[in-house]
Amino acid sequence: MTRKSRGRQKIEMTRMSKESNLLVTFSKRRSGLFKKASELCTLCSAEIAIIVFSPGKKVFSFGHPCVESIVNRYLMKNSTPSSSTLQLMEAHRNASVRELNMQLTNMLSQLEAEKQCGEELSKIRKASQGTCWWEAPINEIGLQELEQLKAAMEELKKNVANEDGEAHWGGVKLFAGCSWGVEF
């Protein structure tokens, strides 16, 4: 079997001639660059600032904790942030972590409640399988059950066709008057 494509090829690093291709490539590579910067911040606790000017003369930036603080630190000859700034940044991080932990706890409790609800529904479904033979697939129902189902359907049909337009089945009023209101 022959290949229809040559697979992933190395792209020659030269300026693109088509404006539309250039803009699309810029957008994709910019998002990839920002994603890698975000990963570096997360994995290594690095402080990063990236400023990019697009071919369309738009400015895009990414910074952690923020672009301004990183640029100011760079312009001030790499001076370290003051202790009050560090305390403020740490407090902000801790508050964010606490908020995320609360959200996680809430989501986990909701998940546990949904799991319990699902287990209860499964128990109810299993318990009612033996009593609700008419809910089984038609090819699994025996001859006696099919005859009972047929009789019940004929009785229902007869009740629906009554002159007064009301059907009663087992003492439960199913249809009232000429409207299709269902009461249980």
Image (spheres, helix red, strand yellow):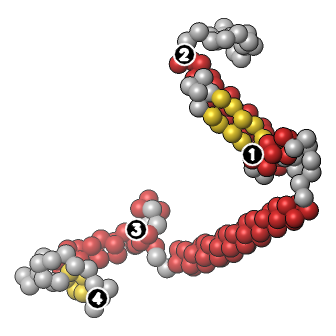
Look at mark 4 in the image and give the residue it sits on. 172
* Lower sequence index among marks 1 and 4: 1
Binning the other alpha carbons within 10 Å of mark 3 as few (below 14), some (14 to 19) or many (20 upward) gives few
Question: Disc 3 residue type?
Answer: Leu
Few, some or many C-alpha atoms within 10 Å of disc 1 (few <14, some 14-19, many ≥20)?
Answer: some
> Toward the viewer: 12 or 5?
12
Closer to the eye: label 4 or 2: 2
First-in-chain label (1 vs 3): 1
Kindly report the distance in space between the C-alpha atoms of the residues bearing marks 2 and 3: 75 Å
Q: Of the two numbered discs 4 and 2 on the same chain, state the one appearing first in sequence.
A: 2
The alpha-carbon separation of the residues under discs 3 and 4 comes to: 27 Å
Q: Amino acid at mark 2?
A: Glu
Label 4 element class: strand
Q: Position of residue 150 (x, y in %)?
A: 30, 71
Instruction: Choose between 132 and 84: the one closer to the eye.
Output: 84
Q: Quadrant of the N terminus?
A: top right
| Image quarter of residue 82 | bottom right
Amino acid residing under circle 1: Val
Disc 4 and disc 2 in contact, CB within 8 angstroms: no
Give the secondary structure at mark 2.
helix
On screen, residue 109 versus residue 126, left or right, reads right
To which residue does mark 3 refer? 143
